Amino acid sequence: MIETRDLRVDYGDVTAVRGLNLSIPKGEIFGLIGPNGAGKTSTIRVLATLQEPTYGDVFVGGVDAALNPTGVHELLGYMPDFAPIYDNLKVWEFLDLFAAAYALPRATRKQRVDESIQLANLEGKRDTLCEGLSRGMRQRLVLAKTLLHEPKVLLLDEPASGLDPMARIELRRMLIKLVETGKTVLVSSHILTELADFCTSMGIMEKGKMVVQGKISEIIAQMSGHKSLVVEVLERVDEAHALIRNFNGVRACSVEKRELRADFDGDEAAVAELLRALVQQGIPVIAFHEEKMDVEDVFLKVGAKEVS
Amino acid sequence: MSSPVASWRIWSNPLVIKGMRQRLRRGTLISAGAVTLIITAFIFFFVYLALTQRGKFTAENAAKMAFLPIFILQCFIMMFLGTGGVATGITEERAEGLLDYHRLTPMSPTTKIVGYLFGLASREYYMFSLTLPFVAFSVVFGGINPLKVLQLYVVFFSSVILYHLAGLVAGMVAKKPRRASWTARIMVITLYLLLPMLGKLGFAFLSYFTVAPTFNGLIREETLIAGLTSVHDLNAIATSHLVPFFSISISPSLYTLLMEGVLIATFFAIVHRKWREESNHAISKSVSLMLFGTMQFLVVGSLWAFFSTGKGAGFAQINLNASPQERVARMMLLFYVFFAISALTSLLLIYIVTPIRDTFLKGLRRARKLGLAGIPWTSDAAPSLAYAGTYFLFTMMSYAVLASLAQGSQVFYRGSVDWTRQLYPLLMLASTMIYVQAVREYWSSRAFFGFLGIVWVLPMMLAMLVGIAVRDATTPLYLLTPTPPAGFVYAMLHAFEPVLTPSDAKALTLGGHQPALTYVSLIWSVGFAVFFSTRLWARERRDITREMSKARLASSDGIAAVRQTES
């Protein structure tokens, strides 16, 4: 649904995006993660046709952005970083402006505006001037505006930036609702935990380059390489340590009080074999599990390598 | 989705409705309305009552005389407040990023421009509408010809659109929001005051970007009252009836509509271009050629009558009893102003259409990627030297036409001018355009203006100081040689020296230094042109070689990668 080929964006001598090849299938929620200045906003602005790339191809829904930007506009909903609103318009007027601008039929416009107000959870603020809205409400209002014309693709640039924890939770709820509607979403953030919950795939950008991208599970598998097993025993810690350390496939094993952590190369059958060996030795195992690597670990791992 | 609103359906344009919602809420409606009504009523009744009660005028004459102050108030509302509103509104929306939302909606750029044009000035249109009953009273009871009033308001609205578009241009072009309101003000002052001043020098078309000539030509006569007519009134009427253009004369309202139409089209093209892509140059290279060509056509048309018969408008006419010295001096002055206007316009266009290095490099990379031999000529990223050359060719052709007319008419001098000498001002212009183009492309804006300050302004200041401190008149003249305005004076004097009478020659050859001053000025400007063009050329060669070698490298990498895959 979203595709870039060898995309490059220069600002003078600075290259913001360097040879970006991105492919996001339909229905995917793609999290674009990276520190400030990584090139996320430039990428999103180019995808939204708001900025011409130095070179490279951009396709949204199969439409070439360079040849038919208007065709891309019909498919897109774009929410910028620190999304602005008209302070001196009322909430319904703000939505009505864009409903009219997107040429929604007059007969259904009011209904659509009301639905959007409901989606943004702003029913009580319908006739309030936008200047009276909190930061979280503003973000939700802009997101509702972005959805007015029912775009197939959403580009959300740091939607949660500057929000307090409560507002973040509300926004996240709204985003999760969106995910359920089957839209293709590209959402950027420099805060990983914002995206980890609901993204199906992600890409990590660093200094204009995409360091890693793909399905979250695939990336984790790719980045992990080996399993990390956590074993907790009631007693006989030294015996358990010796057994695990000498077990086939274990690279290293550390001990902290009654907890043992092992780097293990074996497959799932080997994991089961290790547990059986511990039990057969009569070691009182009270916990045995594989520690899963999460998105944050991947980010740290990649980031540690790439960030200068 | 239904189809987006058409640009002509102003009443259902979402941006107009937005503007009305923003700027015409009940509170504003009442306060702005009350203020407008109070001020208009005060002005109207002050004039009307003062004339009928104190001045013993008839009610008809008083009503007639109240027209002008109300019209001035309307001009203030629409042109001053309206332009400010448009410039400020668009600047704020651009700075906050709200324009980006509208860039993505399916409405056409024309619909969006129309929407902003009328939406951002909706309050001023409302205020204007409240003054209309007073105008109607004045016209009906004052017996002013309604057809002429209608004609006046057609031109008035053309001016309003022009000024509001100037506000939009300022808001879309200025890099920093704070600069936009200043840019708009400067544009309005230029259109309203500076250009009409130049117009008085004989460049008639420059006076017709305002409603004033139409007012003078149509309404002032109507509002005159026997016994109260001043010489100023009569002059204004006399000079506004018909405009000399080539060998014909055009009515002031039609001429104003034509002139404003040219500028409206230009401003519209700028805003339209900026809507499509923020980083685009304000004017495309091809539009700049059309614009410069049109400007030259208008200049030649305005000066045609003067150079062919000695008769024209404003300063561009010669009294039948004028001395030979006065005739030559006036001709030279008009040639000088012609060069100044042509040079300023071409330098402004060069500044706009010349790519800075980043843009050039971006263009090279894009060309490399697309496998092109180089940057396309009409692209913003292409060097503008060829365009500077074309502006020069246009100017040279205009100058040739005007100089031939002057020679053929025998009004200004007898005999003929040595044509090789005519090349000096042209060479001066060409070299100045070339080095300005090269400097602009070579450096950033700051360095560009710094260079112009050092080479153009500093010598003037030095010359003034030396002129005061030392009683030698020659040294300041030589100090001025790097600045093109002085260089043009020297070149013009040198060009027309053979037709000067011996007594004029003594005064105008600058103590016999004028040939040397001309040559030194030319050495400066030609020297700058050669120096900067060479440096620019060398840098561009380096850039092109580097980018193309990257391209070769990339393609050989690609081949290597393919071979590796195959093996």
Image (cartoon, helix red, strand yellow):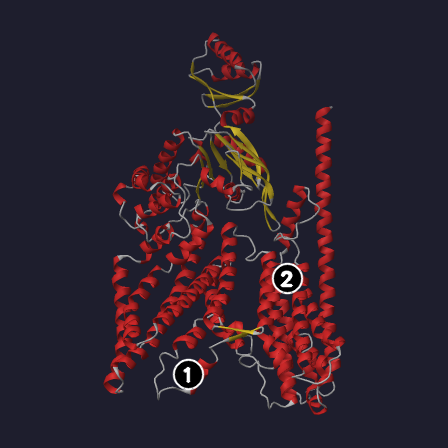
Which disc is residue B440 wearing? 2
**At x 63% / y 81%, what residue is drawn?**
B331
User: For the residue labelled by badge 1, is the local secondary structure a helix, a strand or a loop?
Assistant: helix
Residue B184, compared with residue B556, is above or below; it is below
The reply to whether discs 1 and 2 touch (Cβ–Cβ < 8 Å) is no
- Local packing at callout 1 (Cα closer than 10 Å; few below 14, some 14-19, many 20+) is some
In the picture provided, is B540 more to the left or to the right than A66? right
The residue beneath circle 1 is B233
Q: Nearer the viewer, residue A280 or A235?
A: A280
The residues bearing labels 1 and 2 have C-alpha atoms spaced at a distance of 47 Å
- Helix, strand or loop status at disc 2: helix
Choose top left, top right, bottom left or bottom right for residue A247: top right
User: Within the image, what quadrant is residue B488 found in?
Assistant: bottom right
Q: Residue at x 41, y 29 (%)?
A: A182
Which mark lies nearer to you, 1 or 2?
Answer: 1
Q: Is residue B396 above or below residue A117?
A: below
